[in-house]
């Protein structure tokens, strides 16, 4: 059953169907620019709130993770007001969004193309067949299979869920004991909308040593156009928690012939022709190795930082390729940006949490608290992305100022712990 809220009289802007929006702090900047040039019709599971100022209309559905629920509504919408493109930037919804685009005959309407990105085992198979440099990978469904795979590949190995994003469930194992210790962590990690597998649910992979980067690209009719390269900051080993990112608006790696060749080769191997991608690489001593390709814009405010330091608008690029239009990917500035995520120091109930604004650097761009007093939270691995209590972004004219400023910003967060009730404390002693 659906309900619909309609907006003002349609105009001549392209009609864009958007599947869900996500957290407004992390995605509103995309809608801000898209709404200026496109009429947005939103599919969501609740009446729009902050989104109202950006959308032309909305359809409230019982489920936006299920294509079978959305396809009839999309057909009805298209009959009333033809849709020019379908856009989605949420990992759990990109596959059903592609099915909608397929039914409507629009760009990105190739669910198999998207599935080859969502299912990391299918990604590995496609890369191996095309000879794209990547870590060796073996799918394992049981602990015994994982141990056999690790012995065949050689330690250390990385254990990772087959189809979950944001480094959730990814862990490094140095020996057999650690594989036994961490296999269940990777096997049982789950999030709403994630693909599940009875066999081969965990990938056992060769550890690719070196810095990690990501490249966001607009892909238009098979042509890959990088718009943002970010350097990851990882923490909480042996887990691969993404605690921050640095973006250089004129990163020389974007012109590195080997990286560009691998990026193009990987998209060709996946048959990825239209849409946005977020590709991750390890810069190993033997050269870049592909870790994965996601069929969406990057998260963690990476595209936002890219926009701030290059001037390339990721929302407009995504909307353009969704509608079969050539995206604008020419930079007009060369700055530096960074984001850092904060966590509690240990499992605790937050007593107070605030930002000392006087301690923030001059180049602060955003400073936001994500947790509330009274919440009980833990750092990774229990906390993961949902354990982040605050984030900071900075934009500066030099890499040195940017790196110093993000550390200064993160240090401005002040957290106190709520004391345990006396009776609880006594029970623990």
Image (tube, rainbow, N blue to C red):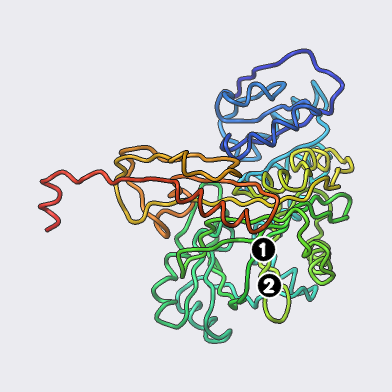
Using the image as rendered, state which of residue 273 and residue 280 is in the foreground. 280
Q: Is residue 306 left or right of residue 162?
A: right
Q: Position of residue 324 (x, y in %)?
A: 87, 41
Q: Position of residue 86 (x, y in %)?
A: 76, 37
Q: What label sits on residue 183 in the rendered view?
A: none
Q: Earlier in the sequence, mark 1 or mark 2?
A: 1
Query: Residue at (57%, 70%) from the top-left corner?
Result: 203
Q: Is residue 36 left or right of residue 326?
A: left
Q: Is residue 403 left or right of residue 239?
A: right
Using the image as rendered, state which of residue 345 and residue 396 is in the foreground. 396
Q: What label sits on residue 283 in the rendered view?
A: 2
Query: Residue at (69%, 36%) from the top-left corner?
Result: 30
Query: Residue at (51%, 60%) from the top-left corner?
Result: 241
Q: Tag 2's secondary structure?
A: strand
- Given contact means CB atoms under 8 Å apart, are the residues at marks 1 and 2 in contact? yes
Q: Tag 1's secondary structure?
A: strand
Using the image as rendered, state which of residue 343 and residue 82 is in the foreground. 343
Which quarter of the rendering shows the C terminus?
A: bottom left
Query: Residue at (67%, 35%) from the top-left corner?
Result: 29
Within 10 Å of the Cα at label 1, are there few (<14), some (14-19), or many (20+) other Cα atoms? many
């Amino acid at each position: 059953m659906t309900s619909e809220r309609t907006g003002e009289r349609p105009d001549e802007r392209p009609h864009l169907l958007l599947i869900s929006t996500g957290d407004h702090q992390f995605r509103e900047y995309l809608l801000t620019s898209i709404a200026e040039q496109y009429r947005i019709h939103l599919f969501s599971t609740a009446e729009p709130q902050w989104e109202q100022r950006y959308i032309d209309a909305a359809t409230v559905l019982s489920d936006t993770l299920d294509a079978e629920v959305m396809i009839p509504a999309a057909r009805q919408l298209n009959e009333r007001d033809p849709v020019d493109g379908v856009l989605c930037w949420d990992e759990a919804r990109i596959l059903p969004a592609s099915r909608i685009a397929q039914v409507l005959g629009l760009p990105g309407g190739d669910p198999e193309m998207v599935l080859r990105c969502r299912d990391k085992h299918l990604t590995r198979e496609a890369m191996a067949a095309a000879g794209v440099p990547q870590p060796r990978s073996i799918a394992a469904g049981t602990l015994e299979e994982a141990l056999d795979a690790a012995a065949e590949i050689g330690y250390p190995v990385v254990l990772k869920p087959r189809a979950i994003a944001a480094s959730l469930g990814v862990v490094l194992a140095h020996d057999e004991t650690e594989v036994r210790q961490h296999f269940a962590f990777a096997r049982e990690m789950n999030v709403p909308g994630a693909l599940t597998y009875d066999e081969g649910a965990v990938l056992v992979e060769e550890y690719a040593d070196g810095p990690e980067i990501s490249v966001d690209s607009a892909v238009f009719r098979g042509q890959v156009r990088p718009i943002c390269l970010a350097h990851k900051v990882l923490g909480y080993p042996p887990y691969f928690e993404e605690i921050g990112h640095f973006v250089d608006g004129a990163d020389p790696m974007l012109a590195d012939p080997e990286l560009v060749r691998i990026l193009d080769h990987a998209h060709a191997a996946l048959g990825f022709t239209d849409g946005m991608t977020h590709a991750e690489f390890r810069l190993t001593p033997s050269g870049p190795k592909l870790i994965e390709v996601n069929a969406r814009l990057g998260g963690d405010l990476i595209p936002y930082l890219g926009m701030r330091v290059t001037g390339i608008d990721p929302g407009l690029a995504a909307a353009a390729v969704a509608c079969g239009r050539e995206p604008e990917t020419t930079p007009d500035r060369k700055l530096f940006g960074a984001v850092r995520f904060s966590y509690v120091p240990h499992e605790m109930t937050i007593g107070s949490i605030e930002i000392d604004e006087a301690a923030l650097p001059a180049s602060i761009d955003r400073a936001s608290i994500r947790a509330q007093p009274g919440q009980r939270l833990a750092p990774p691995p229990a906390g993961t992305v949902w354990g982040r209590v605050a984030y900071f972004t900075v934009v500066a004219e030099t890499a040195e100022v940017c790196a110093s400023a993000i550390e200064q910003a993160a240090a401005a967060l002040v957290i106190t712990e709520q004391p345990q009730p006396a009776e609880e404390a006594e029970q623990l002693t």
